Amino acid sequence: MKTFPKTTLADLLERDIGTVGRALRTVKPDATEKGISRWKIVTALKALGALPGSNGAAPSRRAEVNNSPTFADERTRLMRAKANVAERHDRAADGELVNVKKLVMLHNVERSVVREKLLSLAGEVQGDIGAEGAALVDMKCREALLELSDANSLMRRAARVEAGLGDLHDAAVAARKKDDDEDD
């Protein structure tokens, strides 16, 4: 994520340099470059939001009388929204975010390829293992395909792992437990 000095932040956020300086006075810089303190846009917006008269801070006297948001409140809200969009774009560019619809589509294409190979396997080995063995291979392949066919379930498990609600081992154990339950 990019960092900026106070002056650049003031220009980007269309705020007075004094206001930005007051907001960042007690905030630890996100980086220092050539002795110049630098902050992320999100850090600056949080600091500006903590100033009196901003959303999330003790209201100014004017806000106590009139509950409608001030121009500064709306500008801060807009800048936060822009910063959130910029952060999402940066995270997507870094590969931290993916388009789930595209991922499901890719999963379905890969599943189709695997499906064709697995369904042809029983016929290929029938001469070597006999009709009963081939039927068993076919049944096991179809069970595996059934598990792979639910792309949404797979994506939910992946999202839970990514969100820290489990790890890869937990996901594998859950899938194995599901298999064991079906066998019983």
Image (spheres, helix red, strand yellow):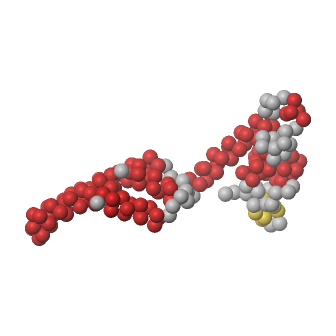
In depth, the one of 112 and 37 nearer the eye is 112
Quarter of image, res 93: bottom right
Is residue 59 placed above or below 180 in the rendered structure? above
Q: Which residue is found at the position 87% from the left and 55% from the top?
A: 25
Q: Which residue is found at the position 81% from the left and 30% from the top?
A: 67
Q: Is residue 12 left or right of residue 179?
A: right
Residue 165 lies, in percent from the top left, at: 53, 58
| Farthest residue, direction front | 184
| Quarter of the figure with the C terminus | bottom left
In depth, the one of 91 and 155 nearer the eye is 155
Is residue 159 placed above or below 129 in the rendered structure? above
Residue 106 seen in the current view:
no
In depth, the one of 115 and 33 nearer the eye is 115
Residue 147 seen in the current view:
yes
Residue 180 lies, in percent from the top left, at: 33, 62
| Quarter of the figure with the N terminus | bottom right
Q: Is residue 183 left or right of residue 170?
A: left
Residue 121 lies, in percent from the top left, at: 19, 62
